[in-house]
Amino acid sequence: MRREDLKLKRAGVSGYNKAKRTPNHPTKSHVVVAKEGSKTKLIRFGEQGAKTNQSKEQRERFKNRHRRNIARGRMSAAWWANKTKWSPSKTKNA
């Protein structure tokens, strides 16, 4: 088995760049094996149990606060949190 395949299996995800919830992890709510070119990286992101994306204002504040880290691209936890947890379609009170 290839080393990359072991990373996917260990993280419990179905493929590269596919985020998955981790309800039993003590601190982080999601995991992803990010891949950019030939580089791969296991990234855990999101606070377990946090109330996120409740309103448009809360979403905008998150994006302003983490703007620089989101701009780093898919190898950063902030980029994945922005995509997975803070997308406009998931806002509870629109």
Image (cartoon, grey):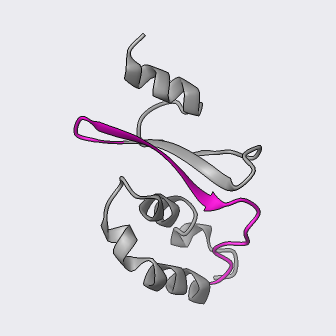
The residue positioned 58% from the left and 85% from the top of the image is 56
As for residue 27 lying within the magenta part, the answer is no
**Residue 72 location, x and y as percent?**
31, 64
**Residue 63 location, x and y as percent?**
46, 79
> Is residue 81 positioned above or below 68 on the image?
above
> Is residue 24 positioned above or below 83 on the image?
above
Q: Quadrant of the N terminus?
A: top left
The residue positioned 36% from the left and 55% from the top of the image is 74
As for residue 50 lying within the magenta part, the answer is yes
**Residue 92 location, x and y as percent?**
69, 74
Q: Quadrant of the C terminus?
A: bottom right
Residue 78 in view in this figure: yes
Quarter-of-image position of residue 24: top right
Magenta span covers which residues?
A: 35-55
Q: Nearer the viewer, residue 60 or 37?
A: 37
The residue positioned 61% from the left and 61% from the top of the image is 46
Circle count: 0
Q: Residue furthest top?
A: 1
The residue positioned 66% from the left and 72% from the top of the image is 52
Q: Residue furthest left?
A: 37
**Residue 65 location, x and y as percent?**
47, 83
Residue 19 in view in this figure: no
Side (left or right) of 75 relative to 13: left
